[in-house]
Image: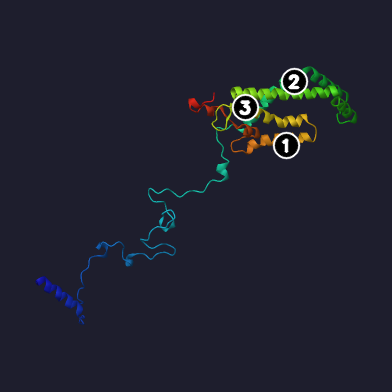
Amino acid sequence: MTQQNETEHQAAAAEQPAQPGQPAPPGPAYPSPYLNGGESQPEAYLAPPQPGQPRYGSPPNAQGGRPFGGGPPRYGQPPAARPAGGLAEASRRDPALAPAWHRIAAATIDWFIIGLVSVLAFWSPLSQIWREIQAITSRYPGLGSPAAQAAINSISRDPANQRTLIYWLLAMFGIALVYFWVQHAAWGATVGKRALGVRVVRVADRSRIGIRQAGIRAVSFLVGPAILLLLVTPINVVGGVLWAADCGLGLLDSQSQTLHDKLAGTIVVRQRSLGQQPRSAQPW
């Protein structure tokens, strides 16, 4: 009863107005707002929200789960996806692919061998034409004179000389066809490619190419220069364009594939990159 009377007395004293000169009665005792177990803090103790920013305690935005539209991602949350690199990443080539200068140097070695063999095969008729040209140069110091040009035209129009040149070119392309076809089918590389340490493999699994692929590659590689050198103008211009397109495509393609590579389904890679494959996957 004593405690109840004391509570009633405090409530009555709180309802009575304070008399002048007397201190105000103490109000009811409430616990601190920070101890009441509430989920939010009183607004009086918070800094005013900045323009364009959410209030304190508001849920994060839906984009990336980051509060206030920025800051690092929360623990365990994947970072925001970066935009694709575009042309820089698309143009990045596999380091296992053979560089362009390796292929050019290998082709130079191969064509030197092919040309040397064909010249030796037609040495007698070709040396006869060469002696006739030397006679003209010794007789006419300036080859730009009308007499020198007439003598050169007579050599080029000679039916015997024309047959010799045609047969020689046909033999050279025949030797080249056998040269590239047999070596690529047997070893995946010619003499020039071996010297530069590159190999021709299948584009799908980088395994050894077969006879069919080696033949398609050799024929499609030689058709351009053959049309250029064997046919007359203006038809031979088509061969020149085809030859340039075949070689130029390798400089633009992401896998360095030329036209004859795409037709045969092959690529040219470094030999040392094949040695890094598992033993069961090695083509040689």
Residue sitting farthest toward the bottom: 20
Residue at 78%, 35% in the rendered image:
235
Mark 3 to mark 1 CA distance (whole Å): 26 Å
Amino acid bearing label 3 = Arg
Q: How was the colour assigned to the protein in this rendering?
A: rainbow
Q: Which residue is mark 2?
A: 119
Residue 91 location (% of width, % of height):
58, 41
On-image quarter of the N terminus: bottom left
**In the rendered image of this protein, does residue 129 appear above or below residue 103?**
above
| Mark closer to the observer (3, 1) | 3
Which residue corresponds to mark 3? 212
Q: Which mark is residue 167?
A: none
Please tell me which residue is depicted at 83% across the width and 23% down the height of the picture. 161
- The outermost residue toward the front is 212
Specify whether 264 is left or right of 241: left
Snapshot quadrant of residue 48: bottom left
